[in-house]
Image (spheres, rainbow, N blue to C red):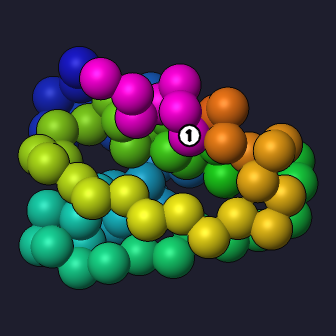
Amino acid sequence: MNSSNSFQHCLHPTLTKLLVKRLRERISINLVGKVEHGRSRILEDIQQCDVGEVKVVLAVTFFNQTFGIFNQIFKK
């Protein structure tokens, strides 16, 4: 796990930092985008940051394509 202030590992450090800040403040986020636009990578980057306990609610159009990624990232 990376330091709470280090976003060097992220593909989009500024965006990830903003999303992590919102999650730490218990503000919900909606992560939307087309296939292959980096949603999975952003989730992976967020996972490497200390955000505490986060409740994940999924509303996925292409559930079969996406569920495996969410399951890998957030399974415990």
Residue 33, percent across and down? 77, 68
Residue that mark 1 sits on:
70
For the record, the magenta segment spans 70-76
Provide residue 27's location: percent of width, then percent of height: 23, 79
SS for dot 1:
helix
Image point 32% across, 78% down: which residue? 28
Q: Is 63 drawn above or below residue 34 in the view shown? A: above
Name the residue located 27 percent from the left edge and 59 percent from the top edge. Answer: 55
One can see residue 21 in this view: no
Above or below, 10 against 15 in this view is above
Where residue 49 sits: x, y (%)? 26, 37
Residue 72 image point, x, y percent: 53, 25
Main secondary-structure element of the magenta-colored stretch: helix
Q: Classify the position of the C terminus by image quarter.
A: top left
Q: Front-most of 74 and 50?
A: 74
Q: In the current view of this chain or complex, which residue is farthest to the front?
A: 64
Give the residue type at disc 1: Phe
Q: Identify the residue at horizontal 38%, vertical 58% (top origin).
A: 56
Side (left or right) of 12 relative to 67? left
- Mark 1: few/some/many CA within 10 Å (<14, 14-19, 20+): some
Q: Which residue is drawn at 38% across and 43% down?
A: 46
User: Would you say residue 40 sits in the magenta stretch?
Assistant: no
